[in-house]
Image (cartoon, helix red, strand yellow):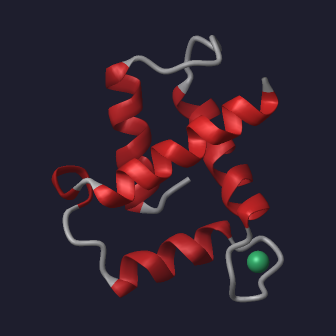
């Protein structure tokens, strides 16, 4: 189940990055911000583990009913939050 959860989160990220309507133009600055946000060990790079931890934290923040899932509105806010780079 854990692996499926991570795969879904990865898919959400990939979708957020790929969807122009959601992401607009993902600029270098956006990428820099995203990497910096995820980069817990400050090596200047975003590992898969670092990204997943950040995504899980963000997911949990929007999973206000603690159901382990997001409805469409929550998912929208989740994606916006991810791309905004706050967390
Ligand atoms: Ca890192």
Q: Is residue 60 above or below residue 25?
A: above
Q: Within the displayed image, which quadrant is ligand 1 positioned in?
A: bottom right
Q: Position of residue 12 (x, y in %)?
A: 47, 43
Q: Position of residue 68 (x, y in %)?
A: 65, 18
- Count of numbered circles on the image: 0
Identify the residue shown where x is 69% and y is 83%. 45
**Residue name at image x 35 percent, y 47 percent:** 80
- Point out residue 25 in the picture as x, y percentages from the top left corner: 21, 71
Name the image quarter holding the N terminus.
top right
* Vertical arrangement, residue 47 with respect to residue 82, above or below: below
Q: Residue at x 56, y 23 (%)?
A: 63
Between 8 and 56, the one lying in front of the other is 8
Q: Position of residue 78 (x, y in %)?
A: 44, 39
Q: Quadrant of residue 51?
A: bottom right
Figure check: 51 above or below 70? below
Q: Residue at x 49, y 83 (%)?
A: 32
- Which quadrant would residue 83 be assigned to in this image? bottom left
Report the side of 44 relative to 58 (left or right).
right
């Amino acid at each position: 189940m854990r692996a499926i959860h991570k795969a879904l989160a990865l898919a959400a990220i990939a979708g957020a990055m790929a969807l122009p309507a959601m992401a607009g133009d993902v600029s270098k600055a956006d990428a820099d911000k995203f990497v910096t946000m995820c980069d817990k060990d400050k090596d200047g790079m975003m590992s898969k583990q670092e990204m997943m931890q950040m995504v899980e934290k963000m997911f949990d923040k929007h999973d206000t009913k603690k159901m382990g899932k997001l409805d469409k509105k929550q998912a929208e806010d989740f994606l916006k939050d991810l791309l905004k780079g706050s967390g």
